[in-house]
C-alpha cells in the first residue's frame, strides 16, 4: 500500500517529517516541501517510519548526490542548507529543553563539503579475494569502496591501490577485519590492519605499501571484541612508530594507532581558536577527556596552567611526547579516569574545558562540578542529546553562548561548543 505525503521539516537524523496522515511519519530521503508516494516500513502506536516509492515533486534544495545515504545521511540536501539544518536543530533542542537565555553564535565551518576526513575505516571481505569497502546501514550487505568522498585524497589513493593489488594478485586473508587509514597535513599516511587474532599478518597483505614514500607507518591492531572497531594491542609491522599532525601549523601532535585526533583539521582549528578566546592569562584550566591533549596544548600559551586528564594509554603517551616536542612547560598530563581524578584536581583550577565521549558527563561528577566553585566551563560535545541533559543538571552554571560546529558535512553528526559561567 502506498500513501501520498508532504514533508514539513527534517528531524535530527535527516529524515523527512510528514504530518498529513493519521500519525506522524519519518521518511528517509525526503526533504521539506517535497511530495511523494511512500510505503510504511514499520509502525508504532503514535508514529511510523517509511521510505519513498515515488518522488512527486523535487525540492530546489535537493543536491545531485542521491545514493550513499546510508553512510552520508544528509548528502541529499544542498551543502549550504546543511548549515541551516544544524543551526535549527541546535536551537530547537535547546529551547525544547528550557534553555532559552543564551547567545547563538555563528556556526563554525570551512565550507569544505567533501574530502575533509583525515581518518577512515574500511571493512575487509574475501569475495573471494580481499576487498575493502563498507556495509549498508543496519545490514550485512557489503559494498566495495574505491573512493570515500569524505576522505582526504591521500586516504583514497591508498584504498584504491590496495583494492587493485588484492584483485590483481588474488590475495585473500580471512583474519583481516578492517583497514584504517589515517592521513596528516603533509599527506603522509599511517595504515592499520585490524585482525581478528594476534597471529602476525603476512607481508603479502601490505606489500604494496612497503615502497610507497608517503606511507610512513604500518601497524597491525588486534581486535579483541566484536563490539569495538579496534582493540588495545597494536604492533608495528613496518616503518615509523607514529604519525605527526598539526592543527594550527605551529604545534605538532604525535599520533599512535589508537590516539584520538579530531577528524576535520581546519574546522578543529577554528573551534580551538574559539576555545582559546574564552581563556585568559590567569586561568588554570582542566582539559578533561583530553585525548592527546590537543586542546590543552593549543590553548597553553593563553593560559596560566593546564591539567590534561585522559584515560587511554596510547593517547597519554602521545600527549606527553607532543608536549615535549612542542617544548610546552605549563601542562601536566594526568593519566586516569576523569570521574575519579576530577575531585583531586578541582581545587587547583578555575576553568574546565570538557570534551566527553557521546555518553556525556557522569551525573555524580556533574554534582561535584556544581559544588566546585569553578568560574567557567567550556563544553565541547558530539551529542546534542547528552549535552542538553548535562546542561540542565549543571544548575550552578548559566549558559552564556552556544556555537554549532559543522565538522562533518554530508552527515547529521553535530558538534557543539557551549560556554558557561558560574551563576552570581
Ligand atoms: C571526544 S574525545 C576528546 C579528545 C580531545 N579533547 C580532542 O579534542 O582531541 C574523548 C576522549 O576521552 C577519553 N576518555 C573516555 N573516557 C574517559 C574517562 N573516564 N576519563 C578520561 N578520559 C576518558 C577518550 O579516550 C578520548 O580520548
Image (spheres, helix red, strand yellow):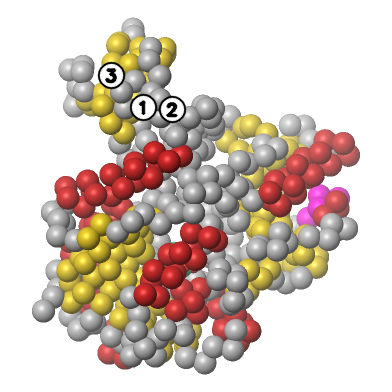
Q: Is residue 334 visible?
A: no
**Residue 405 location in percent, x, y?**
39, 55
Q: Quadrant of residue 140?
A: top right
At label 2, counting other C-alpha atoms closer than 10 Å, the crowd grade (few under 14, some 14-19, many 20 or more) is some
Residue 202 is one of the magenta-drawn residues: yes
At label 1, counting other C-alpha atoms closer than 10 Å, the crowd grade (few under 14, some 14-19, many 20 or more) is many
| Quarter, ligand 1 | bottom left
**Residue 170 location in percent, x, y?**
86, 37
The residue mark sitting in front, 2 or 1, is 2
Q: Which residue is mark 3?
A: 6
Of mark 2 and mark 1, the one earlier in the sequence is: 1
Quadrant of the frame with the N terminus: top left
Q: Residue at x 53, y 65 (%)?
A: 260
Tag 2 near tag 1, CB within 8 Å: yes
Numbered disc 2: secondary structure: loop
On the picture, is 111 further left or further right than 100?
right
Q: Quadrant of residue 215?
A: bottom right
Of mark 3 and mark 1, the one earlier in the sequence is: 3
Residue 37's place in the image compared with 326, above or below, is: above
Q: Is residue 135 visible?
A: yes
Region in magenta: 201-206
> Within 8 Å of ligand 1, the CB of disc 1?
no
Of mark 2 and mark 3, the one earlier in the sequence is: 3
Q: Residue at x 44, y 69 (%)?
A: 272
Amino acid at each position: 500500500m502506498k500513501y501520498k505525503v508532504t514533508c514539513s521539516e527534517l528531524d535530527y537524523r535527516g529524515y523527512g517529517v510528514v504530518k498529513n496522515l493519521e500519525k506522524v511519519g519519518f521518511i528517509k530521503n525526503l526533504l521539506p516541501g517535497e511530495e511523494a508516494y511512500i510505503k510504511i516500513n514499520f509502525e508504532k502506536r503514535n508514529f511510523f517510519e517509511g521510505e519513498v516509492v515515488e518522488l512527486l515533486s523535487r525540492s530546489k534544495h535537493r543536491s545531485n548526490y542521491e545514493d550513499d545515504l546510508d553512510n552520508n545521511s544528509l548528502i541529499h540536501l544542498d551543502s549550504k542548507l546543511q548549515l541551516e539544518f544544524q543551526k535549527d536543530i541546535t536551537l530547537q533542542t535547546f529551547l525544547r529543553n528550557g534553555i532559552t537565555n543564551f547567545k547563538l553564535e555563528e556556526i563554525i565551518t570551512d565550507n569544505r563539503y567533501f574530502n575533509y576526513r583525515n581518518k577512515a575505516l574500511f571493512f575487509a571481505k574475501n569475495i573471494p579475494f580481499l576487498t575493502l569497502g563498507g556495509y549498508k546501514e543496519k545490514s550485512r550487505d557489503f559494498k566495495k569502496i574505491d573512493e570515500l568522498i569524505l576522505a582526504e585524497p591521500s586516504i583514497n589513493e591508498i584504498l584504491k591501490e590496495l583494492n587493485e593489488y588484492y584483485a590483481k594478485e588474488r590475495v585473500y586473508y580471512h583474519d583481516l577485519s578492517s583497514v584504517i587509514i589515517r592521513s596528516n597535513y603533509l599527506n603522509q599516511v599511517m595504515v592499520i590492519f585490524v585482525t581478528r587474532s594476534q597471529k602476525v599478518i603476512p607481508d603479502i597483505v601490505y606489500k604494496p605499501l612497503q615502497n610507497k614514500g608517503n606511507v610512513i607507518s604500518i601497524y597491525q591492531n588486534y581486535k579483541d571484541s566484536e563490539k569495538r572497531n579496534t582493540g588495545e594491542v597494536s604492533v608495528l609491522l613496518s616503518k615509523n612508530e607514529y604519525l605527526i599532525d598539526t592543527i594550527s601549523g605551529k604545534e605538532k601532535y604525535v599520533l599512535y594507532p589508537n590516539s584520538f585526533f579530531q577528524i576535520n583539521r581546519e574546522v578543529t582549528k577554528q573551534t580551538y581558536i574559539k576555545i582559546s578566546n574564552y581563556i585568559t592569562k590567569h586561568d588554570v584550566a582542566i582539559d578533561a577527556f583530553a585525548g592527546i591533549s590537543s586542546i590543552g596544548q593549543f590553548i597553553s600559551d593563553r593560559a596560566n596552567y593546564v591539567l590534561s586528564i585522559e584515560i587511554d594509554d596510547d593517547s597519554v603517551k602521545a600527549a606527553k611526547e607532543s608536549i615535549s616536542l612542542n617544548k610546552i612547560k605549563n601542562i601536566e598530563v594526568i593519566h586516569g579516569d576523569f570521574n575519579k581524578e576530577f575531585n583531586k584536581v578541582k581545587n587547583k583550577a578555575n576553568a574546565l574545558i570538557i570534551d566527553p565521549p557521546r555518553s556525556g558527563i557522569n551525573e555524580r561528577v556533574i554534582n561535584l562540578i556544581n559544588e566546585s566553585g569553578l568560574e567557567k566551563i567550556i563544553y565541547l560535545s558530539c551529542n546534542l542529546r547528552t549535552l542538553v541533559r548535562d546542561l540542565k543538571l549543571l544548575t550552578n552554571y548559566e549558559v552564556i553562548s552556544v556555537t554549532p560546529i559543522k565538522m562533518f558535512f554530508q552527515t547529521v553528526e553535530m558538534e557543539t561548543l557551549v560556554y558557561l559561567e558560574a551563576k552570581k
